Image (tube, helix red, strand yellow):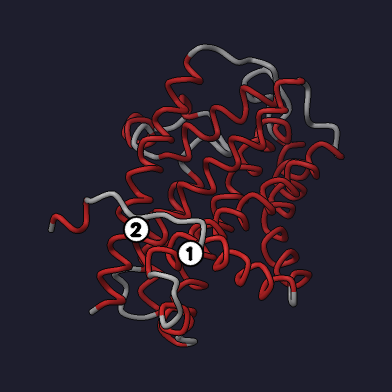
Amino acid sequence: MKEIFKLPRVSWSCLRVWQRDRDAYMKFYKVGLVGSLGDPILYLLAMGYGLGNFLEQMEGMSYVKFIAPGLVISSAMFSASFECTYGSYLRMIYLKTYDAIIATPLSIEDVVVGDILWGATKGIINGMIMFLVIWAFGLIDSYWAIGIPLLIALVSFLFASLSMITTAFVPNFEAFNYYITIFLTPMFFFSGVFFPLTKLPPWVTTLSKFLPLTYSVNISRALIYGTPSWIIAWWTLLLSVPALISFGLAVNLVKRRVIK
């Protein structure tokens, strides 16, 4: 049990694993980008400009401006999550990539850390592209938005680590449906992306306080529309601490699974 909670060994060799994942991605990156960005852009157009025409202003702004910051962050969340669930599981179990790499001087810790960093990178790529999309639509009002790349990186790292923990336990691909259906999808809809939390039932508001996407969306909205406050530091802490804890757990849990 102690092995799960010990600090993982991290070396620069993990970047070789990251590089391997990057090279594999670059062979099919066009297909990956279309698949990853199709949904958030569709939400922006269909709900923001479509449904938004039938809704009153949300918190003093148009509906499309209200949902745009959340779509940036959720795009990063889903991209990092899918990469470190389906992608990592495929490499670990079916392609035997993990086994092949640890037959070299690289350690299992290097492999897992490199995979998590690549999952976070996928989140950063897709989150930043979505950020540029809303910028092109004229939906950014403040220079505080220069902080969004750092937020995207933190959110991507957090969800890459959380997803890798899930990968350490699932017996097959189908089991990821529990993680997506019970955790990711409800969080997407009940973390303030589409509606102010104050307009939702009290139990949903209470639940949202335990969801990392809630604080991510709050920070994103504050930066993009120029309403930062000191509470952002607290929200950032609520994301950073779970990210570091999840990272350590993910490395140790996957190590235990592979060694078994």
Q: How many marks?
A: 2
Amino acid on which disc 2 is placed: Ala
Q: At which x and y percent is residue 33?
A: 73, 64
Q: Which mark is residue 84?
A: 1
Look at the image and tell me in which quarter the N terminus lies: bottom left
Q: At which x and y percent is residue 182?
A: 36, 58
Name the residue located 47 percent from the left edge and 16 percent from the top edge: 231
Tell whether 60 sits left or right of 215: right
Instruction: Give the quarter of the image for residue 145.
Output: top right
Nearer to us in this view, 193 or 74: 74
Q: At which x and y percent is residue 260?
A: 23, 79
Instruction: Give the quarter of the image for residue 31.
Output: bottom right
Amino acid on which disc 1 is placed: Cys
Q: Secondary structure at mark 1?
A: helix
Nearer to us in this view, 25 or 197: 25
Task: Establish if 201 lies above or below 57.
Answer: below
Q: Residue furthest left?
A: 1
Name the residue located 41 percent from the left edge and 27 percent from the top edge: 237
Q: Secondary structure at mark 2?
A: helix
Q: At which x and y percent is residue 233?
A: 48, 20
Q: Which residue is mark 2?
A: 250
Please tell me whether mark 1 or mark 2 is closer to you in this view. Answer: 2
Nearer to us in this view, 256 or 122: 256
Nearer to us in this view, 36 or 169: 169
Q: Earlier in the sequence, mark 1 or mark 2?
A: 1
